[in-house]
Image (tube, rainbow, N blue to C red):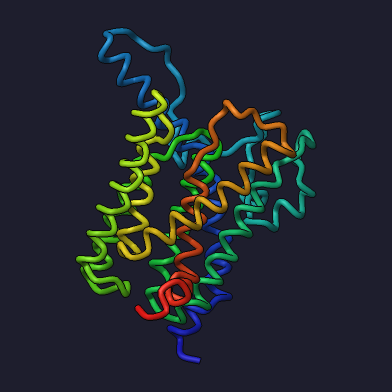
Amino acid sequence: MPPDEILYSPWILAVLGLCIGSFLNVVIHRLPLMLERGWREESAELLGVELPETAAITLSTPRSRCPSCGHAIAWYENIPLASWLWLRGRCSACKTRISARYPLVEVATAALFAAIGWRFGAEPTSLLWCGFAAVLVAAALIDFDTQLLPDILTQPLLWAGIIAAARGWIPVPLLASVAGAVVGYLSLWTVATLYRAIRGHEGMAAGDFKLLAALGAWMGWQMIPLIVLLSSAVGALVGLAMIVFGNHDRQVPIPFGPYLAGGGLAAMFFGPALMRLWLPNS
C-alpha cells in the first residue's frame, strides 16, 4: 500500500480522531468561558469599571485539573480513551467520577474520522472533511451546553468551505458554495423574522443562521433543503423524547445547533444518494 493511502486510511484517521476528540473536549469546556471573560472585560471597559483580578484561561492554560480536588492531571492520565478506561472513569486522587462524555466525544470523533476515510477514500480531501466534522462536533456540544454557537467556529467554517470550493478541494463549484452560504443564512433568518413578527419573541438565534450558511458553503445551495429537513426531523424526535421522558420544561428552549450539525454530517455522508432518491430525474 502506498504511503499516502496508509496516511489517510480509516485506521490512521481513527487514531487522529481520538486525539482531536480529546482536544475538542477542551474546546467545548473552555471556549464559552473564554468568550464570557472577553465579554465581561469589554463591558467593564465600556462602563469604566474595574473587574477583580482572575487567572487567565486559554485553550492551553491553566493545566487541566480535577474540578473536585484540584489534582493536576498528568500526561499519562490524559491519553485519549485509554486513560479513562485505566482510571475506571474516576480521578486518581479523590476518586470522583469523571463524566463519560469525555471518552464518548473521543470515540465519536474517531468514528467520524474513520467513516470519512471510508467515504472519501485515502485522499487529502478526507482531512478537509475531518476538520469540517470536528468543528461541527464542538459547535453542537457547545450549543447544547450553553445555547451559544460561537462566531469563532461558524465563521471560519463558512470561509473554509468557500476557499475549499474555490481551490477545487471539494466537489462543489464556487458559485454553488457562495449561493449555499447566502441561501443557508437567509432561509433561517426569514423563518426567525416571521416567527418574531407573529409570536413577538425570538424563536431562533443568529448562530443557527451562520451554521447553516457554513453548511451551505461546504455542500452547495442544492443541499440546503435536505439539511433542514434532516435537522428538523431529528430535532422534533429528540425534543419530543426530552419532553415525554425527560420532564423537559416546554418553556425552556431546545438548541437547534446540534440538529443542524447532525443534518450536515448526514448530508456529508448520504446527501448525494438521498438527493437522487428525492429528485431521481435531476
The residue lying at 37 percent from left, 20 percent from top is 40
Asked whether 71 or 260 is in front, the reply is 260
- Residue 17 is left or right of residue 280, and the answer is right
- Residue 225 is left or right of residue 10, and the answer is left
Q: As displayed, is residue 159 above or below residue 8?
A: above
The residue lying at 46 percent from left, 34 percent from top is 32
The residue lying at 30 percent from left, 62 percent from top is 221
Asked whether 190 or 50 is in front, the reply is 190
In the rendered image, the residue lying farthest to the bottom is 1
From the top left corner, tell me how far across and down residue 158 is, in percent.
30, 54
Quarter holding the C terminus?
bottom left
Asked whether 254 or 30 is in front, the reply is 254
Q: As displayed, is residue 19 above or below residue 1?
A: above
Quadrant of residue 3 in the image? bottom left
The residue lying at 43 percent from left, 33 percent from top is 203
Asked whether 74 or 148 is in front, the reply is 148
From the top left corner, tell me how far across and down residue 11 is, in percent.
58, 75
Number of labels in the image equals 0
From the top left corner, tell me how far across and down residue 157 is, in percent.
34, 54
From the top left corner, tell me how far across and down residue 269 is, in percent.
49, 70
